[in-house]
Image (cartoon, rainbow, N blue to C red):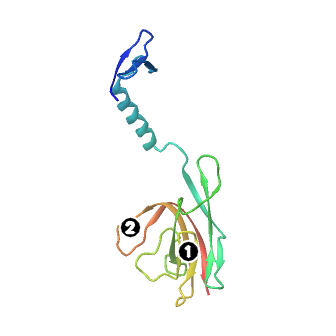
Amino acid sequence: MGGRSRIDQHGQLALRSNSSRRRQPVRRCIVPGFRPRSVGALFLFSMAALGCGGGRHLESVTLQPSIATAQSGQFQFTATGTFSAPPSPASLTSRDVSWCVGEVSSAPGASPNSCVGFVIPFATVDQNGLATCNPNLHATGYILAGAHPIASTIPDEGSQFKVSGYATLTCP
């Protein structure tokens, strides 16, 4: 269906169909001072604002309970986050934090700040906070939940989180 168009005296785009010769007005929007190159500058400005960290940020993580014993070999932990803007505090999910097993607390220089590396852990933890004890190891260690992991430069060490929290789990 071919047709021709023109601008009428009211600034509207009028379409004429070859078959009916009837005009169909189409409104158009004119923005004074708008130039196509302004879109690129606006896009770059908005991307820069997003990249500068504007918005809501996770500031701290707390695990509940802070001390637990896995009597049946498993224990469910939950994580709560404190944010830079409301709503805060808020429950955290696997979209907000990652979970890992830390060191055994009786190890020399044990710290609740990093995940275990290439060692056999005393337990494992899934991305929903369910910890499962290793049936061959009876120990007390750390369970961590955190955001923004930082990989270790030493291959045998685990990663750390920029923002994290921990709890102590005993596997009897």
Mark 2 = which residue? Answer: 152
Q: CA distance from mark 1 to mark 2?
A: 18 Å
Task: Specify the quadrant that holds the N terminus.
Answer: top left
Task: Check if mark 1's residue and mark 2's residue have beta carbons within 8 Å.
Answer: no
Mark 1 belongs to which amino acid? Tyr
Residue density around tag 1, few if under 14, some if 14–19, many if 20 or more, within 10 Å: many
Q: Is residue 46 left or right of residue 146?
A: left
Most distant residue in the front direction: 19
Mark 2 belongs to which amino acid? Ser
Q: Residue at x 51, y 74 (%)?
A: 101
On the image, which quarter does residue 141 sit in? bottom right
Task: Specify the quadrant that holds the C terminus.
Answer: bottom right
Q: Is residue 152 above or below residue 85?
A: below
Q: Secondary structure at mark 1?
A: strand
Q: Secondary structure at mark 2?
A: loop
| Label annotation for residue 108 | none
Picture coordinates of residue 22, whole percent (x, y): 42, 18
